[in-house]
Image (tube, rainbow, N blue to C red):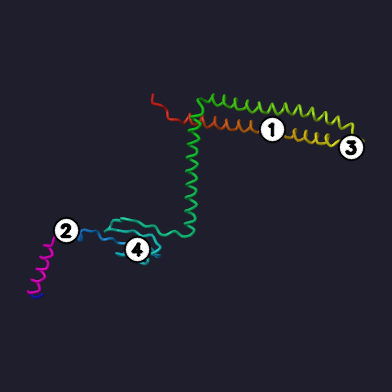
Amino acid sequence: MPRFERIWVLAVQLIVAAMPGAGSAWAQQSTTPKQTYCCNDSDGVQICSDRLPHQCYNRAYRVMEGSTVVRREEAPLSAEQRRQRIIEDRRQLEEDRARREGLRRDRILIDTYNSVQDIDVQRERAIKEIEHGMLQAKNELVELEKQRQALVEETEFYRRKTMPAELRAAIRANEADIAAQQSIVDSKKKDIDAVNARYDEDKRRYIHLLRNAPRAAE
């Protein structure tokens, strides 16, 4: 390079260096890490570039600064993978919901009963209330059966002649009332079975919670 050109280049460098912030900008440029995008192609060969190579499209890739991986990007999911991801997310949500619901029921259980014996006391009270309603229905059935028998005896007078419409209506009403009261009795029996099942489960769960509760420091 001719002497004149060297002097000119040196002068320009001195002017640039003297500009405010020029030194810090130069230092920042020189210290900023260069990012490199790398992935493995279909043959497993690593491909890297300062921009995302087209071979890395639709593939997992990593962003590197020097030899350090600063970010990883997963490959886009296929339609089947997206479907499976949705199924898995829904399953996880359902498990979380069931877990929260279980914890809520456990808190209610602990707040409801003071002891295992308290569960038996409340069970007996609930069953007695149901049995009271069932007894009323059974007593009503006894009276309805008496009415039915009286109506049957009355029909004996009409074996050879037309039965009055009022008597036929009374028989139908009696049969409907008997069916209704019998339905109540059957329903009460199912209610008792349901109460026993519920209190059995409450008792089992309550004992489990007591056995697994954290022990207070002695």
Give SS at disc 2.
Answer: helix
In depth, the one of 145 and 195 nearer the eye is 145
Residue highlighted by disc 2: 24
Relative image position of residue 146 (x, y in whole percent): 79, 27
Q: Amino acid at mark 3?
A: Thr
- State the residue position of label 1: 184
Local packing at callout 4 (Cα closer than 10 Å; few below 14, some 14-19, many 20+) is few
Circle 1 Cα neighbour tier, 10 Å, few/some/many (<14 / 14–19 / ≥20): some
Residue 5: quarter of image: bottom left
Q: Label 2 crowding class (10 Å Cα cut-off): few <14, some 14-19, many 20+?
A: few
- Of helix, strand and loop, which mostly describes the magenta segment? helix
Quarter of the image where the C terminus is located: top left
Mark 3 or mark 2, earlier in chain: 2
Sequence-earlier tag: 4 or 2: 2
Seen at 38% across and 59% down, the residue is 60
- State the SS at label 4: strand
Q: Furthest residue to the bottom?
A: 2
Residue range of the region highlighted in magenta in the rendering: 3-25
Residue matched to label 3: 162
Which-is-in-front pick, marks 4 and 2? 2
